[in-house]
Image (cartoon, grey):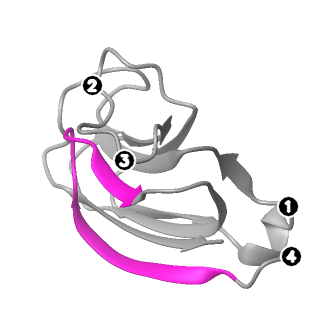
Amino acid sequence: MATPILVNGYTGVSATALPIRNQDCKVMGYHIFNSSNATAFVQFYKGQANAPSGPTVGTTVSDWAVPVLTLTHAFLPVTAASDGLYFPGALWIAATTTISGSTAPSAALVVSLAIA
C-alpha cells in the first residue's frame, strides 16, 4: 500500500467541482464537516488527467457520494479503506444538497482527504 498523502483544508467545497489530483489516485480516508443547515452530499468524480475543465455538477454522474447530516462530521478512517477508493485519471470533488443535484449547500463544507 502506498503511503497516503494528507490533502487538508478544502474549506470551500460547494457546488463547483474542485480539482484534487491530476493523476490516478486512491482516496484512503476522509474527514468531512457540514456546517450548513441541511444534509449535504460530497460528490467524488473521476476525470481525465490534464483536462481543461472538470465535471459539470448536476449533469455529470458522480462516482461516489457521501451524505453528511447538518452540523456533523463524516469519517472514512484510513484503516477502513485499506485498498482505497480508486479514481483513474484525476479526482474532483463538489458538495450539493441532493445526491445528484447542482444546488450548493447553505455553507461550504470542509473536506480533508488522505490520498495515495
Which numbered disc, 1 or 3, marks the residue that appears first in the sequence?
3
The residue shown at (60%, 66%) is 75
- What residue does disc 4 label? 1
Which numbered disc, 2 or 1, marks the residue that appears first in the sequence?
2
Asked if the residues shown at circle 4 and circle 1 are in contact, with their CB atoms under 8 angstroms apart, the answer is: yes
The circle drawn on residue 56 is 2
Identify which amino acid the numbered label 1 is placed on.
Asp
| Residue neighbourhood size for the residue with mark 3, other residues' Cα within 10 Å, grouped as few (<14), some (14–19), many (≥20) | few
Depicted 42 relative to depicted 71: above or below: above
- What residue does disc 3 label? 50
- What residue does disc 1 label? 83
Helix, strand or loop at label 2? It is loop
Residue 21 appears left or right of 28: left
The residue shown at (80%, 63%) is 81
Label 1 and label 3: CA atoms lie apart by: 25 Å
Q: Which residues are magenta?
A: 4-20
